[in-house]
Amino acid sequence: MLSDGDSQRVAELMRETAAGELVPRFRNLAEGDIREKRPGDVVTVADIASEQRLAVGLARILPGVPVVGEEAVEKDPGLVELIARPGERCWVVDPLDGTSNFSKGRDLFAMIVCLIEDRETVGGWILDVPNDRMAAAVKGRGVTLDGVPIKREQPKRPPKGLIGYKVRKAFDKQLAPAQRRRLGPLSTLNCAGREYIEILAGTYDFNLYRRTKPWDHAAGALMLREAGGSAVRFNGEPYRPEGPIDGGIISAASPGVVTEARAVFEMVEVPLLSLTPR
């Protein structure tokens, strides 16, 4: 089981890595420091250096536990299968969440680490790098934001959400005014880690994604559950990190917000919300 000391060491490693690999490169990237992995999906030298440093440090915290990093999976897709192995443990790492923002000089980026054990997320850490805010959760022990325990209740106003531009556009086009008023303002930060931080902080109430890569969502889903909320697939099943990446996720720090958001989304016909056969 992960000890409190181990959890603190992970948080310290993340801050050290951000200070050494991300902050010095922010708004200081040369042209050759950015490349496309595929159209619209960029990676920078900061991503690579951050992941390498995290992998070395995590190996010291829990020797022998493999690291499934976003950039390592790009080179070896089979690594992601470690997440779904019964009885096994692995770290899952997003060394620079919000790379597109980072590469454009926008201060909306984060670092995410989680620990998977027997296909369940048992530990999660998110560092909002520009603002030095750290969220941390251990399964069954709650979640903290900057060391303060977080519990959220159902808001007494229409819930504010973080969703993609195309889905938001479909809402505005298809929903009747009364239906749309069931939800509050909708926006996006283009950075899942920062969005989970803002939900914990109470700035927003829920988020929605169609693609659910584990390095983006496993830590945040655990945190919102530990805050008293839930994280579910579009079909209503609980989110699990080994599930299909096109299964979707709606997550909030209050189960009632998830229920309300799902009810509204089910009124909208959006191709992006259709499950992809696997």
Image (cartoon, helix red, strand yellow):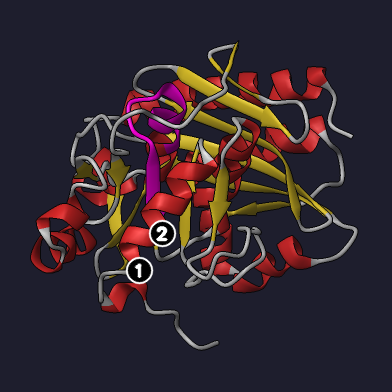
Residue depicted at x 87% and y 46%:
64
- Badge 2 vs badge 1, beta-carbon distance below 8 Å: yes
User: Is residue 131 found inside the magenta-colored segment of the image?
Assistant: no
User: Is residue 200 found inside the magenta-colored segment of the image?
Assistant: yes
> Does the image show residue 53?
no
Magenta range = 196-208
- Frontmost residue, 253 versus 56: 253
Measured as percent of width and height from the top left, residue 100 is found at 27, 48
- Extreme residue toward the front, this view: 178
Classify 10 Å Cα crowding around label 2: few (below 14), some (14-19), many (20 and above). many
- Frontmost residue, 65 versus 185: 185
Residue depicted at x 32% and y 63%:
265
Considering the image in quadrants, where does the C terminus appear?
bottom right
- Frontmost residue, 254 versus 73: 254
Compared to residue 67, the image places residue 171 above or below, namely below
| Kind of residue sitting beneath label 1 | Glu
The image quarter in which residue 45 lies: top left
Compared to residue 84, the image places residue 44 above or below, namely above
- Left or right, 221 with respect to 97, comes to right
Residue depicted at x 90% and y 59%:
87
The image quarter in which residue 192 lies: top left
Considering the image in quadrants, where does the N terminus appear?
top right
Measured as percent of width and height from the top left, residue 31 is found at 19, 47
- Which residue position is annotated with label 1? 266
| Kind of residue sitting beneath label 2 | Arg
Measured as percent of width and height from the top left, residue 89 is found at 82, 51
- Left or right, 216 with respect to 262, comes to right
Compared to residue 244, the image places residue 142 above or below, namely above
Residue depicted at x 80% and y 32%:
60
Where residue 262 is drawn, which disc sits there?
2
- Extreme residue toward the bottom, this view: 277
